[in-house]
């Protein structure tokens, strides 16, 4: 399965914002953005005039990298969002939020999207009682996501459950950390996503 394996701190520096790709490290003094805010590369610190296309491209790259999605996957999500009724940009963010790895991250059972993806790949979660190891699975309203029974006794998941108990989940998820479960009570709305996206720039980019 294809995935990005390069240094992730460079991605945050390139986009000029924290993408929280390394969990707790991103909120510590070791964060690359806090230490070196310039873009990576020999000319990263140079002042460059950003044109309209550049702004649109950077917004698309920032969104794609935040959710850990490769280019072809992202294009497929956009095309699906464009086919749905309503605002294409909002539909796109809603689809990305409903990925299973993102749901595990929003539950508080992973420190980053990357960790959530790994946990799902290793088969630690179930959806409606069935084991699932596909991070890109799109959940629906009414779905119940749970840590697999065999995994709950591990020290790793006990620690994650304690962390999830103090984590603030979005209102479209009903999380019961002590039971290792969460339920999708509604589809995520645009206002439920607290990360700074400008999805209209992405729509303009793909509409050229």
Image: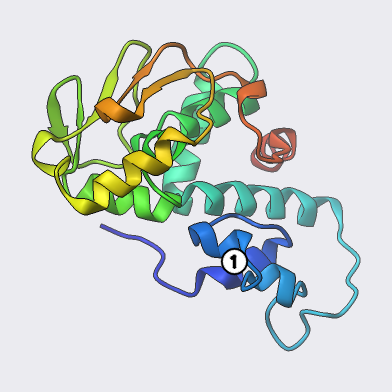
Q: Quadrant of the C terminus?
A: top right
Q: Position of residue 86 (x, y in %)?
A: 61, 13
Horizontal arrangement in the rendering, residue 208 relative to residue 116 (left or right): right
The residue lying at 39 percent from left, 47 percent from top is: 110
> Disc 1 on helix, strand or loop?
helix
Position in image of residue 11 (x %, y %): 59, 66
Q: Residue at x 84, y 50 (%)?
A: 52
The mark tally for this picture is 1
Residue at horizontal 45 percent and vertical 74 percent from the top: 6
Q: Is residue 79 visible?
A: yes
Q: Nearer the viewer, residue 50 or 119?
A: 119
As drawn, the residue found furthest toward the bottom would be 42
Is 73 located above or below residue 131 in the figure? Answer: below
190 or 64: nearer the viewer: 190
Q: Residue at x 48, y 15 (%)?
A: 187
Determine which quarter of the picture holds residue 5. Answer: bottom left
Residue matched to label 1: 11
User: Where residue 203 sits: x, y (%)?
Assistant: 68, 34
Relative horizontal placement of residue 176, taking residue 121 as reference (left or right): right
Residue 135: percent from the left, percent from the top?
30, 42
Is there any visible trace of residue 102 in the rendered image? no
Label 1 Cα crowd, 10 Å radius (few <14 / some 14-19 / many 20+): many
Query: Is 12 rendered above or below residue 20?
Result: below
Query: Toward the viewer: 140 or 84?
Result: 140
Tell me the quadrant of the picture where the N terminus can be found. Answer: bottom left
Q: Is residue 188 left or right of residue 86?
A: left
* Display colour scheme: rainbow
């Amino acid at each position: 399965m294809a995935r990005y394996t390069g240094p992730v701190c460079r991605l945050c520096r390139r986009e000029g914002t924290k993408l929280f790709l390394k969990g707790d490290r991103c909120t510590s003094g070791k964060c690359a953005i806090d230490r070196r805010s310039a873009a990576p590369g020999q000319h990263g610190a140079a002042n460059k005039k950003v044109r309209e296309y550049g702004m649109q491209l950077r917004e698309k790259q920032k969104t794609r990298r935040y959710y850990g999605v490769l280019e072809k996957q992202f294009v497929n999500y956009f095309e699906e969002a464009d086919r749905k009724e309503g605002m294409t940009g909002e539909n796109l963010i809603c689809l990305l939020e409903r990925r299973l790895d993102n749901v595990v991250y929003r539950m508080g059972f992973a420190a980053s999207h990357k960790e959530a993806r790994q946990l799902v790949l290793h088969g630690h979660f179930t959806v409606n009682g069935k084991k699932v190891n596909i991070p890109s699975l799109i959940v629906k309203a009414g779905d119940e996501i749970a840590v697999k029974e065999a995994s709950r006794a591990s020290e790793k998941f006990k620690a994650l459950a304690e962390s999830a108990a103090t984590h603030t989940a979005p209102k479209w998820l009903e999380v019961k950390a002590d039971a290792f479960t969460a339920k999708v009570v509604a589809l995520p709305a645009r206002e439920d996503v607290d990360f700074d996206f400008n999805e209209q720039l992405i729509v303009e980019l793909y509409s050229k």
